Image (cartoon, rainbow, N blue to C red):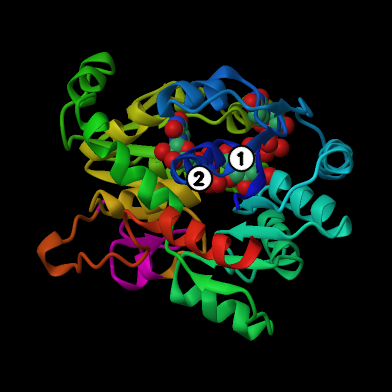
Amino acid sequence: MKLKLLRIVGARPQFMQAKPLTQELKKRGHQEILLHTGQHYDDRMSQQFFRDLNLSKADINLGVGSANHGEQTASMIQGIEKHLLENKYDAVVVDGDTNSTLAGALAASKLHVPVVHVEAGMRSFDKKMPEEINRVLTDHVSKLLFCPSSVSQNNLAQENIVKGVYLSGDLLAQCFYKFQKEALARVEQNLQQYNLKQNEYVLLTLHRAENVDNQKRLYDYLKVIATSPWTVVFPVHPRTYKKLVEFNLEHIIQQKPFQLIPPVGYLDMLALESSAIKILTDSGGVQREAFYWHKQGVILRDNTEWTEIVDSGWASLYLPGNDSCDLWKICDANLLTDQQFYGSTDVAQKIVDIMEANLL
Ligand code: UD1
Ligand code: UDP
């Protein structure tokens, strides 16, 4: 017997997380239909990753595009529900915490199609984040929940979710280790292209709604990051770029130390991470990748779901006004643990083993 699964993707990190699982399912002869909601649609936010990762084109693209949360999520639910009414699946697989995740979980659970949530149990305990709402709701309607860490497993237990919960590790970690070598082969080319020297620049990403939609917060971050002793390479998310223009803050990032670049492909992003002296980010994915590269990081938030990274000293949390955090300090890396908290190369294998045992 073989599984027939509907896999929902839509936003940038979900393409990386799709890769290892898609490969493992294919290897075992299971059928996976890839549904792209169209939440991200610019070439640099979507198709670029299909090329980089050598992922087959999505079987279905709903093309929902950008809108307010309600309208965007509703269009996705409508499209996914229609597809589920016309096609039979053993389960719908969603990952992470985007609107595409929640839409997949709601459409499937109401039609009694089992929901599999990858990256389950992550919590910031901050309901002001749209992602926190998406995660909590998705976890509560899921049949199988794959946790990247024991902390996330414990978070679910605190909400009385214990059945169907498994510790799998982080699919993004598996993708990282798969492409690490290819990324390293791109380092020279990237350093040349952006006129950078190894370990002489900081890499910055900033896109969380609570950071960039708030004019004062965004301004305060940029002002403090402008004090960097190193060049600050800033591949800017389209949401952030729009806000920089809307808030008239472009003049800040047009000057040194900032070096603004468009969003880059996955391999180039990994290459830029690998050679940075430090990584400043509010991204869930980039903070983990910094950790996987053994790079010191600053998480531009006052909390993180990936608590092990901060607890082990690899990154600190920073909100503007927190004068006790020295953004530009480099610690002796020998004093930091290189423990792999989130698994490495067999995450997809574990997930498929458990799906086979529970869904066939
Ligand atoms: C979404 C996720 C966030 C994730 C991020 C990954 C939600 C609620 N948020 O945030 O958790 O970390 O993706 O990058 O699902 N835009 C474009 N081109 C695109 C996509 C977006 O210009 O291809 C612009 C639009 O102006 C849009 C804005 O970016 O309104 C925000 O896009 P949206 O998908 O709503 O949220 P993200 O900030 O990308
Ligand atoms: N990323 C990329 N190019 C960029 C910025 C990020 O390829 O210009 C990758 C990054 O390496 C990671 C993922 O996108 O794998 C993280 O996505 P993002 O920061 O958009 O979302 P989050 O992880 O915060 O949900």
10 Å crowding of disc 2: few (<14), some (14-19), many (20+): many
Q: Residue at x 60, y 27 (%)?
A: 238
Locate residue 69, reporting x and y percent. Answer: 81, 44
Q: Quadrant of ligand 1?
A: top right
* Residue type, mark 2 in image: Leu
How would you classify the magenta stretch by its main secondary structure? loop
Amino acid marked by disc 1: Glu
Q: Are marks 2 and 1 in contact (CB under 8 Å)?
A: yes
Examine the structure image and report whether residue 327 is included in the region drawn in magenta.
Answer: yes
Q: Which residue is mark 2?
A: 25
**In what quadrant of the picture does the C terminus appear?**
bottom right
Q: Residue at x 84, y 60 (%)?
A: 112
Badge number at residue 267 = none
Of helix, strand and loop, which one carries label 2? helix
Among numbered discs 2 and 1, the one appearing first in the sequence: 2
Q: Is mark 1 within 8 Å of ligand 2?
A: no
- The Cα–Cα distance between marks 2 and 1, rounded to whole angstroms, is 7 Å
Element carrying mark 1: strand
- Residue labelled with disc 1: 32
The boundaries of the magenta stretch are 308-328
Residue 281 in view (yes/no): no
Residue 122 lies, with reference to residue 236, above or below; the image says: below
- Please indicate, yes or no, whether residue 244 appears anywhere in the rendered image: yes
> Residue at 53% across / 25% down in the picture?
56
Residue 256 picture quarter? top left
- Residue at (69% x, 35% y) in the render: 35
Residue 327 appears left or right of 302: left
